Amino acid sequence: MGDCEVCGAMKVGTRTAMRGRSPIEACKKCIDRMGLDVDTAPPVRKQISTRGTPKSKTSGGYGGRGKKGKDIMMRRSKELRSDFASAIRHAREQNGWDQRELAKRMAERVNIIQHTEGGKRPSDPVIQKFERILDLKLMVEREAEEESDVHRSSSRPLTMADLYEQAKKEYRGE
C-alpha cells in the first residue's frame, strides 16, 4: 500500500509506471486513465551493510541514509555565467595562448577546451581550473528565480495530475 503520485490517493495499491523517463508510483485508475507504461520487473533491493558505520548526526540513523553535507537548497547558490565560452576564449587570447597551450597548462585534453569554447558546459572541476589558470570568474551569484503561480481551488493537496491538467489548459490558452 502506498500513495499515488498522480491523483494523491493515500494508502492504495500502487505500481511503478513510467512517464517519459521518470518512474512514478501510480494507482490502477491513474495508470488506466493516463495510459502509463507499467514497470513489470520486480524491484531490485540492495543490501546495505550497516556494520561498523557510525551513527551520523545528520542522517538520524545507520548506513548513511538521510541528509549529507551541505543543504541542497544552498548547493546551487552560484551558476555558470551565460557568456562563459566567449569569456574563456577572450582570456586565452589575452594571454597569447592557443587551445593546445591552455589545455597543457590545465592538464586537460584539447577537445575539452574546444567543446567549452563552443558553448558546451564543462564539469565543475574543469570550471575551477579555467578560473584558476585564466584568473577569471566564471561562477556568479544566482539571480532571483522566476516563480510560477499555481492555482488551486479546493483544500486538498496539489497532485501531479492537477499540475498536468493546468499545463494542458495553459498550452491550449484557456
Image (cartoon, rainbow, N blue to C red):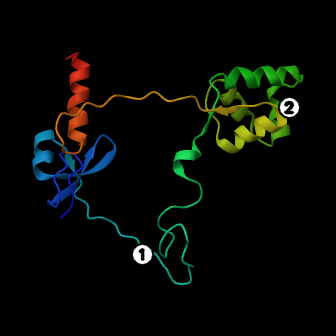
Quadrant containing the C terminus in the rendered view:
top left
- Whole-percent x and y of residue 19? 27, 42
Tell me the crowding category of disc 1: few under 14, some 14 to 19, or many 20 or more residues within 10 angstroms, Cα based.
Answer: few
Indicate the amino acid at tag 1: Gln
Q: Residue sitting at 71 percent across and 31 percent down?
A: 138
Earlier in the chain: of badge 2 and badge 1, it is 1
Circle 1 SS class:
loop
- Whole-percent x and y of residue 32? 10, 45
Q: Which residue has dot 1 on it?
A: 47
Quadrant containing the N terminus in the rendered view:
bottom left
Q: Residue sitting at 42 percent across and 29 percent down?
A: 147
Q: Residue sitting at 68 percent across and 24 percent down?
A: 85
Indicate the amino acid at tag 2: Glu
Nearest the camera: 55 or 111? 55
- Disc number at residue 101? 2
Tell me the quarter of the picture where residue 57 sits: bottom right
